[in-house]
Amino acid sequence: MPAHERADILRKAAHLLTEREDEFQQAITAESGKPVKQARKEVERSKQLLLYAAEEAKSIRGEVVPMDAAVGGENRLGFVKKIPLGVIGAITPFNFPLNLSLHKLAPAIAAGNTIVFKPAEKTPVTGYKLVKLLHEAGMPKSALHLIIGTGSEIGTPLVAHDKVAKISFTGSVPVGKSIQKAAGFKKVTLELGSNSPNIVFDDANWQEAAERIVAGGFGYSGQTCISAQRIYVHRAIFNDFTDELVRLAGDLKIGDPADESVDIGPMITEDEAKRAEEWVENAIGQGANAVMKGVRTGALLAPSILTNVTKDMHIVKREVFAPILAVIPFETEDEAVESANDSIYGLQAAVFTKNIDRAFRVADRIESGGVWINDASTYRQDNYPYGGVKESGIGREGVKYATDEMLELKFIGAKLDG
């Protein structure tokens, strides 16, 4: 299919999604429990993502190689083309069932690949609606397939299949490791876990930092891989900053995610809410101080904010994926950076300061795929390279960068007469 037709499909899909915005928002809220105002933002981002991909489809280009740079290369022509990999296996999570699915499907279409798409087993309806929309936009049914089931039943054979050229997966570290092992010579993009550090210096606008961190730590019940989790605060402002976190978190409304005024809805399952509740209890049992302790009602878990935590506690060491903040004091810049880097993860981080030299110095020193200055780690746009280091993953998403990873280079050379 020529590039202009692929671009037309992606543009038409964006138009159709605009027409059906309410339908998709309602599906996301109904099956994932995401509050309606956050689901609406996900749909809006997804429309933009499709338009980015439409532009990218017509911007794929190779290059001419200067063959006469080598002795004996005279009278030779060489150029490089970018060609589709073939079949892309896309495996997506529940927490952004539309946007994170499109982070795989849209670049694959832009690059000219065919796709076998497995949405999360807890959010198949949004995946089904998305595939139907793309088919209606003109994507051939033979080039985009939907499969629904568990990871063991469906994901494992998809990863191992010899006709699949690449697997793009977003999910947990253990599953990512098993995919990497099973993929063999396939290309893989693995977007995995995190426990994002957010560093707040004493010269920062700390009231604004607190607002951004509360939004970034408790939005969608903290079920975001770049959710603000480890909050390192300069000791000079630690008490005031913690009090502000508690005040702001106390203003959040918890309840029915279909209610426009609700900020925090249920977690994806009651078992997950129980697991997060246990982590809080375990931390308290090990000496942590709960300046705010969230009450659980079924799958609804209110925010928790803990101080006096240690690096060996689950709420610091592991990915909490729940509405829990661990707030930790520091004295020096070196201490803050060393603590932020003391993790198996490195997906996205944040630093709050008015000192521009410190801001960029610390950003360079943090071991992370991305760092935000004066915004929480949770902020993401769909047009920059997104991905992690260490056990946070392999490869990058973001439309242009994901498209590049779904293409391979082919060199063609010719000996000319003369």
Image: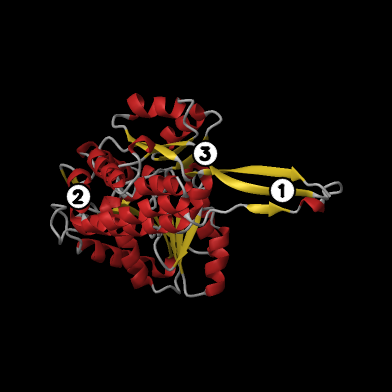
Residue 92 versus residue 84: which sits nearer the camera? 84
Describe the element under mark 1 as helix, strand or loop. strand
- Farthest residue in the right direction? 71
Q: Is residue 162 visible?
A: yes
Tag 1 or tag 3, which sits nearer the N-term? 1
- Residue at image point 38% right, 42% down: 314
What residue is disc 3 on?
85
Q: Nearer the viewer, mark 2 or mark 1?
A: 1
Instruction: Say few, some or many: other residues with alpha carbon within 10 Å of mark 1 (under 14 / 14 to 19 / 20 or more).
Output: some
Instruction: Say few, some or many: other residues with alpha carbon within 10 Å of mark 2 (under 14 / 14 to 19 / 20 or more).
Output: many
Q: Which amino acid does the dot numbered 2 rest on?
A: Thr
What residue is disc 1 on?
78
Q: Which amino acid does the dot numbered 1 rest on?
A: Gly
Q: Nearer the viewer, mark 3 or mark 2?
A: 3
Q: Which amino acid does the dot numbered 3 rest on?
A: Leu
Tag 1 or tag 2, which sits nearer the N-term? 2
